[in-house]
Image (cartoon, grey):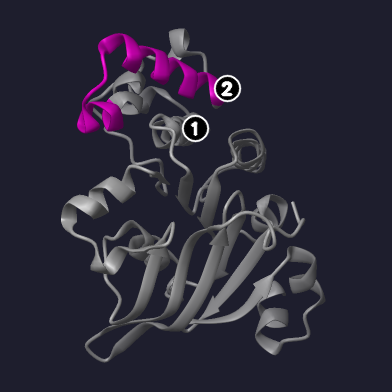
Amino acid sequence: MTEELSGAGGVAAELRDVYLAFDDHTVLDGVSLRLFEGETLSVLGGSGAGKSTILRLVLGLALPTAGEILVHGRDIGRASNDEVLAMRKDMGMVFQGAALFDSLTVDENVAFPLREEGGFTEEEIDLRVQEALEFVDLDAERVGSLLPAELSGGMQKRVGVARAIVDRPAMLLYDEPTSGLDPITTRTINELIRKLQSELGVSSIVVTHDIKSAFRISHRVALLSAGKIVFIGAPEEMTASQHEYVREFLR
């Protein structure tokens, strides 16, 4: 997954010289970053580097102290609440730990975004739920009536992905998608992320500390340190980098 996409298509999301600070603590310090259409971009970094904050900014859940956040060319920081909600409908979020509703069945969890949005018939909801579950290689008839507690961690993660894609978004945001998973399940989730990119053409930002997974799924990777981007490029370029922090991080 190392082919360069920067010359193809448009820009799905962009951070322009973004600063974010709380009191005396700087979270992001002049971050500029582009996600191209159809690209998978992984954001790496240690704990507290500001990785997950980038997802919150793109979703409009936080506003920068300075700088711009553009989603498909529109400044989310200057959009009204209704406009932000409309923009979020084009984004799917896969949370760390799946974040499923414990009291809802698999079918109900996956259908939740459609019911929140409204305007769908029960037949349309059932069809979309079935399609989403099948896309993540889950048997809708077998797992649809189960509760999250009855699923393995990997299956819960796949249900979380199904919920994220049921509304057919153009962009997917992942927060530590392989955290806490065994190597076999990690490989399954990585293959699923690649399948979403290749078959659906979605643009994805993957926040992760898992270097091996990032290299396997990404067209480009960005490395954050103390709120600054110290590297961005293809995985093989990162491997060849002589930057001191990059070398230390890879070790």
Q: Which residue is mark 2?
A: 137
Q: Which residue is mark 1?
A: 158
Residue 130 included in the magenta stretch of the image? yes
> Within the image, what quadrant is residue 231 found in?
bottom right
Please, is residue 195 above or below residue 209 in the view? Answer: above
Quadrant of image for the C terminus: bottom right
At label 2, counting other C-alpha atoms closer than 10 Å, the crowd grade (few under 14, some 14-19, many 20 or more) is: some
Farthest residue, direction left: 81
Position of residue 219 in the picture relative to residue 139 (left or right): right
Q: Which residues are magenta?
A: 112-135
Main secondary structure of the magenta stretch: helix
SS under mark 1 = helix
Check contact, mark 1 vs mark 2: CB within 8 A.
Answer: yes
Q: Amino acid at mark 2?
A: Asp
- Give the residue at x 78% y 85%: 242
Residue 58 included in the magenta stretch of the image? no
Please, is residue 169 above or below residue 122 in the view? Answer: below
**Between residues 219 and 208, which one lies in front from this camera angle?**
219
**At which x and y percent is residue 114?**
29, 28
Which numbered dot is residue 25?
none
For marks 1 and 2, the one nearer the N-term is 2
Please, is residue 149 above or below residue 144 in the view? Answer: below
Position of residue 244 in the picture relative to residue 172 (left or right): right
> Within the image, what quadrant is residue 227 found in?
bottom left
At label 1, counting other C-alpha atoms closer than 10 Å, the crowd grade (few under 14, some 14-19, many 20 or more) is: many
**At which x and y percent is residue 116?**
21, 32
Count the numbered circles shown: 2
Distance Cα–Cα, label 1 vs label 2: 8 Å
- Give the residue at x 33% y 42%: 89
SS under mark 2 = loop
